[in-house]
Amino acid sequence: MTMRAAIILAGGKAQRFQTKEGTWQDKALALLDGKPLLAHVLLNVADVVDESVVVVNENFERHEKYSSLIVEHNIRDARLITDIKIDDLSGPLVAILTGLKAVDAELCLTVPCDMPLLNPKVAQYFLSEIDDSTVAVPMWPDGRLETLLTALHRQTALQIADALTQLDRSRPDDIIRGSQNALFVSPFGKIRQLDPQLCSFVNVNSPEELSRLQPRQGQGESGRDLRLKLGDLPQRGIEKLKDAAGLRKGGRLAEASEIFAECAEVLEREGSFFWAAISREFQAKSLRNTATPQLASQTTEAFQKAAQNYNAEAAQYNKNGCYLLAKRAMADKTWNQTQTKQ
């Protein structure tokens, strides 16, 4: 039997959950039917996975309270882990990477601590349907994603997340973009049969949302899951990008820019537009940081090529109705275009 683990994301600042007056409120400990939200999440996945890890920041008080919660609610096979330190990065992607490094399971389920009504059958569906995709993620008919509720093949996702963080990327949806091989699960297909009211997707961001617990609404009627494969994962290229990132951070900018350029050429030929775009972007950043005026034209050209690759990536997602990912790619394109005018 395939080993499975849940990675519960509980290290956020919960800024939208705070009121104008009073002390900071820990959303994970907010009560629903007499139990903290975190307890609901852990209990909902307990029979679906072999172990659960709760990823939290370094706050000692949180650690104490969460540890007591696990004992009080008799939650089996659960433990706390602390976010790893990666330069100035923080947020969900770092938490996901932390969780992936902490477990040995082949399949992982990521769940934010503020989704207390996740149906165990829905969790099971994501893990059982992922098949040979790297990631399975809910996608509404209008292209929105629930980017923190995912099933992941751990080894591949770990390689992707590790490379992304070393390349200063912090958005969790970059794991999906980087995988090139994702299952987009429609809430209106099999999920709706398992959870007719779609309560699994209730996400608590504020005290008001906790009081009414309204499922997210989606436009459209598509009930089909989409299995999208945009090419094979360029594992060798990703490892070379990590090497180049290390050289860049060590100040060896000329060497780094050469490797980024070499990676980009290969990835462009393979049609791995996301990784090719990142390669060109960091080629440009490395060239610019050398502070050599003679390289200005090469820097501009690299930023332009990065924008072209992001544009090609966006076109792939638009073609398949993955509009949120297309929007993210276009935002990256726009940023690179602005760099050519500086």
Image: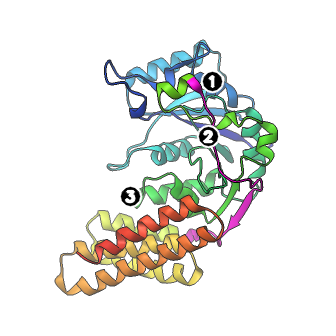
- Give the residues in magenta: 212-236
The quarter of the picture where residue 47 lies is top right
Which residue type does callout 1 highlight?
Answer: His
Q: Which-is-in-front pick, marks 1 and 2?
A: 2
Residue 223 lies, in percent from the top left, at: 77, 53
Q: Is residue 229 left or right of residue 304?
A: right
* Tag 1 secondary structure: helix
- Crowding near pointer 3: few (<14 within 10 Å), some, many (20+)? few
Q: Which residue is mark 1?
A: 40
Q: Which residue is mark 2?
A: 216
Q: Indicate whether 71 appears above or below 213.
A: above
C-alpha gap between disc 1 and disc 2: 19 Å
Q: Main secondary structure of the magenta part?
A: loop
Q: Indicate whether 201 appears above or below 27.
A: below
Q: Is residue 220 magenta?
A: yes
- Tag on residue 79? none
Give the position of the N terminus as an image quadrant.
Answer: top right
The quarter of the picture where residue 280 lies is bottom left
C-alpha gap between disc 3 and disc 2: 31 Å
